[in-house]
Image (cartoon, coloured by chain):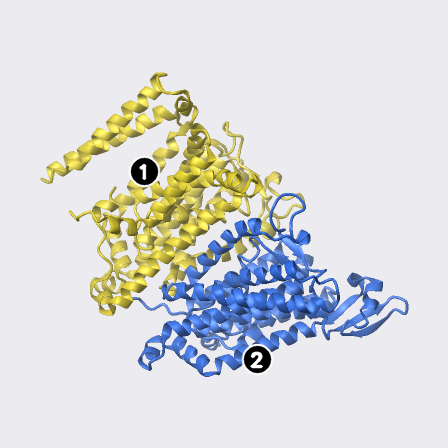
Amino acid sequence: MRKFNLKRFLVDNIVTIIFLSLTIIGILIAKQPIHILVNDLVRRFSRNTLLVLSLIIPVLAGMGLNFGIVIGAMAAQVAVIFVADMGWNGPGALLMTMLISIPFSILFGWLIGKLLNKTRGQEMITSLMVSLFAQGLWLLVYLALMGRIIPIRNPDLLIPGGIGIRNTVNLGDGQGSGIKYALNNLWSMPFFLAMTVLLLILAGVSILRYLQSKRLGLTDQKYLVWLGTSVLGAIIMFIGHATLIYPESLLALNTVNVPMATVLLIILVAMFINWLMKTKLGQDFRSVGQSQAIAAVSGINVDRTRIIAMITSTVMAALGHIVLLENVGVLNTYGAHVSIGLYSVAALLVGGATVNRATVGQAFLGVILFHTLFYIAPFAGAILLNDAQNGEYFRNIIAYGAIGLSLVLYAWKQTSAAEAEPQAEEEGGPPAPNPETINQ
Amino acid sequence: MFDRIKTFAAGDNLPRFVILVFYLLILLVAFFLNQSIGVLISDTLIRYGMNGILVLSMVPAIQAGTGPNFGLPIGAIGGLLGMLISMEFIPQTIAGHQWIGLLVAILVAIVFGIFFGWLYGLLLNRVKGSEMVIATYTAFSFVAMMCIAWLVLPFQNKSMKWPIGQGLKNTITMENTYGGLLNDFLSLKFVENHLTGKLELVFNRSNSWVIENYGIESALKFQFPTGMILVFLLACYLVYLFINSKTGVAMRAVGDNPSFAVASGLNVNRSRLIGVILSTVLAAVGIVIYSQGFGYMQLYNAPQQMAFGAVAAILIGGASAQKAKISHVIIGTFLFNGILVAGLPVANQLVEGGGLSDVFRVIITYGVILYALTKIGGKSNA
């Protein structure tokens, strides 16, 4: 086990530490009631986490932060608009939306992957530019061709002139029509009960992990700590659900509804990523991410692996965007996808990920920190500026600042390492990621 | 035949060629749609003068090896500060004072440009290899931070502030300062005399009462914004002198081949710093010229996307991410703005409801940038 080095810990996690401090300061300034904050956070977590998770695989495959998930979101919207045009309703419609989005996102992901293979070393700026470029094509198709060349049956979707999709498309009333809340309505729970269930699931996983490590002969005490903590947490949460002994401000938390179906979907996707990274394909992603030359020498088809990474990311982003739209209930036809890349990338980086390192745990932490801050920022800003309107500007600072800061710190480290020891880079390459951190 | 097209596509000429053909096509369509060619050309010239220096600011950055300057908004903010300070402190109600106002704005913009460019250049020297994406997000973050600054900076001039609430306005009109000053300087205008029904040629605004009497909107048929074009050409000449000076040659050598430059004893970081500072200063001056041509200053999120158009313009002119010449600026700015100006009415007339003109801009801008990115070289990096 590595010795704990405080300076190193601070330097390695500086972005997370800064944003954690900002979040705490923001919460103290804004003074929002806790159940309203948690309610908003639960909603934002269930909406955005899948999109953030979709960024992980390209990072591990050495392609940086994939701003191109915006195009995955477009694939989702292609399907959402098609299903809205068909007038399908309920969970079946949601499933159909997901199925229809998959071929589009595979196609788009393949195209982006092809492009990124031509712009090696500049993947991030390329994925950003391609997302902006795609916005032009999106406007062209949905503003000029829909209703003119591509037939639309449902006149409610069209701009009154009959050409182009409306600015906002209603996705249902949340009680069975359309896809709005199709997933939320499947299974929701009050906050304390939901937490109890989730912590018990975590306890179960800890037991399995512990038994697994025992079978391998390296009894890991860590899982026992996990087990104890999660069982204790579950008991505390269940007391909150079943009794009234907590203060009233905390009891109000039980008015928060947790969409369990969405949360379970998120957990499944997170487990899928961890499973995928253990397969041959996942190891290929990682080898390509560490050194394309060495990966090529060891017989990995580098270009193909990178394309597969992009396709996986794009498909996951499309599914994530569908879950987001299902929860929002209204499609902002020309704007819903635009900021997806920005906010998802910022959230992942706030969680402590870098250009070449990202874990599921960082994604979860990042979504919670970033979106708490994102919710709090306008309130805190309004108090700081004495003006309710302008608090919004703080959100932009947070999102762009998070990305700018992480990218600069990462590149700074790379450049100073390269200038200090020019030959070390060729010999050692980046340090091998610690498997424990990735499997959390 | 196919092979010949393929050879041509491999060269750097393809985007320039495609855009030129497209431009001629649009002009042809505009002609058949009875658009006024005079208005199209004079609008193109005005936008050419407005954007020229912003596009020119790409040249030193590319030549110093930091790639197209996606951090242009940083310089633009320096220019906005220069204009605000000029407006705050220089009363410009008397005719001649507008020149002082413009000059002060440019000088203050240069000071801010040097300061911001120096900091930004130090940053770029520490992030070699990922300049483009970092420049983009540094600029975005800076624009976001300045949104707060525009709210709290202690400017007092009533015409710049919101009548109620706090902070500077989103768009600040410059009609009472030096807005349009360079456009009109030595300009040539064809003006329709409503009494006689004949066109009159007006030179250097000395007869500007003719225009005011009949209303600018209906009278303007064609304008050659001489002053603005002259300023652009002057800036081009100054940059030309610089890049052929000793410092400039050293800077280009560093941009061409950093390791060779180190071997010949050149200071790579210093040259890159000079290139970035010059680029930022040009961006700052560029936004002053842009705003006086436009007639409005735009604050808050307006500068955010400004870099992309300028990058696209120089790329259309034949530059790449590593090579750029002043001729690329001169050609590229004309083609890019020509298409935007001519495309707008054509697109609106072809598809009712509008909205499509922006599509042209978006697809051309980012398409061209993407094309240039693929030319950086797809070799596998070890």
Q: Is residue B351 left or right of residue A250?
A: right
Colour-to-chain, blue: B
Give the colour of chain A.
yellow
Q: Is residue A243 left or right of residue A93?
A: left
Residue type at mark 2: give it. Answer: Tyr
For image coordinates 53% across by 43% down, the residue present is A392
Q: Is residue A272 above or below residue B169?
A: above
Q: Which residue is mark 2?
A: B237
For image coordinates 53% across by 49% down, the residue present is B148
Mark 2 vs 1: CB contact within 8 A: no
| Residue B75 place in picture, x, y as percent | 52, 63
In 3D space, how far apart are the residues under numbered discs 2 and 1 (Cα atoms)? 62 Å
Mark 2 closeness class: few <14, some 14–19, many ≥20 residues within 10 Å: few
Quadrant location of residue B187?
A: bottom right
Is residue A373 visible to us here?
Answer: yes
| Residue A105 place in picture, x, y as percent | 42, 49
Total tally of numbered discs in the picture: 2
Residue type at mark 1: give it. Answer: Leu
Is residue B313 visible to us here?
Answer: no
Q: Nearer the viewer, mark 2 or mark 1?
A: 2
For image coordinates 82% across by 71% down, the residue present is B207
Q: Residue furthest left?
A: A217
| Subunit under mark 1 | A
Quadrant location of residue B66?
A: bottom left
| Residue B88 place in picture, x, y as percent | 64, 58
